[in-house]
Image (tube, rainbow, N blue to C red):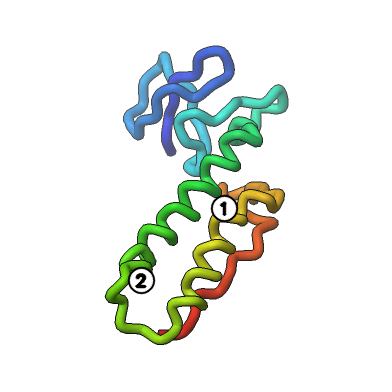
Amino acid sequence: MPFAKIENDIVVFKTYKNNSSLTQIPDNVCCGMIKNLDGSFSSPPVSSEEVMNRLREKRNKLLIQTDWRMVSDYPGTNQTEWQTYRQSLRDITTQTPSLDADGNLTGITWPTPPND
């Protein structure tokens, strides 16, 4: 069973070594989690700005993976389809994302990349 140092109801340190100055916690508790009044633990609330940052981060990775298709000597015959896909990725921020309990983006319809 793990133990934690809790300051201002926030887990700041977690260890598996017993120490009388630490509080015993469930195994699934991580640093940064909040200790609730009932003794349970929960993740801190995520701001809408953080959700959008995560969305942009994922979107940017997908754009980077397709940059090479936009060079003038790209040999594919479907460059227009890739341009449309990339524009759809840029427009993804007009949707309203949220995070599930595991921190994964939800509420987003990701465009499907064209076939090669």
Q: Is residue 106 above or below residue 44?
A: below
Q: Residue 32: horizontal and vertical position, in percent? A: 49, 28
Q: Residue 20: horizontal and vertical position, in percent? A: 40, 17
Q: Is residue 97 above or below residue 48?
A: below
**Residue bearing mark 1:** 104
Q: Amino acid at mark 2?
A: Arg
Is residue 67 toward the left or the right of residue 56 in the image? left
Label 1 environment density (alpha carbons within 10 Å; few <14, some 14–19, many ≥20):
few
The residue depicted at 46 percent of the width and 47 percent of the height is 57
Is residue 6 toward the left or the right of residue 73 in the image? right
**Residue bearing mark 2:** 69
The residue depicted at 53 percent of the width and 69 percent of the height is 85
Quarter in which the N terminus is drawn: top left
Distance, label 1 to label 2, CA atoms, is: 28 Å
The residue depicted at 45 percent of the width and 83 percent of the height is 78
The residue depicted at 65 percent of the width and 59 percent of the height is 108
